[in-house]
Image: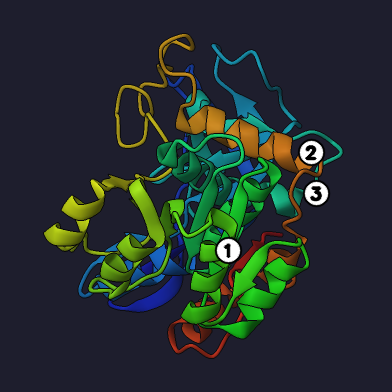
Amino acid sequence: MKRIVANNKKVEIIEDEVPSIEGKPSYILVKTLYSVISPGTELSLLAISDKRQVHLGYSAMGEVVECGSDITDVKKGDLVACYGAPYVHHDEYLLVPKTLYAKVPDTVDPKEAALGGLGAIAIHALRIANLQFGETVVIVGLGVLGQLIAKIANAAAYNVITYDLHESRVEMLKEDNIKSFATVEEMEEAIQIDTKSRGADAVLLCAGGKRSPLTHECLKWIRTKGKAVIIGDIEPDFPRDLMFGKEAQLLISRAGGPGRYDSVYEKEAIDYPYEYVRWTEGRNLEEYIRLIKEKRIDVKPFLSEAVEFEAAPQEFEKLLNKESSTLTKIIKFS
């Protein structure tokens, strides 16, 4: 099979063996139809691939071609959304544990399902914020992840205010009737009006950059006892005086939810008890599929550009050199 890797800071297509399901009763073998480039994560991996090979990708969908003996919820020929490296990459075939896939209904566009990994991450970020119905959430940074979080928060009937420097990204959310601004001043005014000067209940930081002035500024936008949630690649550098003055909560959202990086949950495919861990990364993936199935959110604006598998390395170069203004790219497998 073919797979896309980063090698010595270049993106390449290499040949590898198709993974075997033998001896893995709780796994399925999937023939990939679409995968999604996550620019923030994957360009970071590309940057650290000096003199070594790094596998890229973590969100995809495809057709089940073989099932382990313990699999009962899907069968050969079914479509599934898959999430999570090292099981999901930009590979022609994926060997995925039962805790990391969700069945895709016939009514769902396969390209929309391929965004499932990003959808799970967005859903988990909102769960970490632990908001209640009607509360005000500010989302800063409107890349594909920030956009997804804003759409899901809006579907959940939170009062959503968003901000990004790029006018084109701001305009995308206005089509969903989400309050979205390209200047800090306009955003701050909206927060003041909507909260009667009390401040937002939470600010979700989805912007990139290790050292960001947003970690200082966002504390001015939240209410007393409000929350700052880090989702992007931001160093948690928060000034004590502002944190103390508002008794603010600092929270960090890690990937798609409970189970991530746990070898028992992922590699051994042993799920957490439903009654004790309601929302695992796998169940968040299922919830994303429900949202698009019921048309609670519209992700079609992210899917404007599907590229053929063989052309994918060039698309990574465009993203790296900032020649592309798109939020993400969908890779189409033959």
200 displayed left or right of 9? right
* Residue type (three-letter) at the residue carrying disc 3: Asp
Residue at disc 1, secondary structure: helix
Relative image position of residue 74 (x, y in whole percent):
68, 22
For label 1, the residue is: 193
Badge 2: residue crowd in 10 Å (few <14, some 14–19, many ≥20) = some
Q: Which mark is residue 109?
A: 3
Confirm or deny contact between disc 3 and disc 2 (CB under 8 A). Answer: no
Judge by depth and name the residue closer to the eye, 117 or 63.
Answer: 117
- The relative height of residue 5 versus residue 135 in the rendered view (above or below) is below
Question: From where the camera sits, is residue 143 visible?
Answer: no
Give the percent coordinates (x, y) of residue 314: 54, 82
Tell whether 109 sits left or right of 305: right
> Which residue is more in the foreground, 192 or 81?
192
- Mark 1–mark 2 CB contact (< 8 Å): no
Q: Residue at x 26, y 51 (%)?
A: 246
The numbered disc on residue 293 is 2
Q: Is residue 26 visible?
A: yes
Specify which label sits upstream in the sequence, 1 or 3. Answer: 3
In the rendered image, residue 298, in percent from the top left (x then y), is placed at: 76, 54
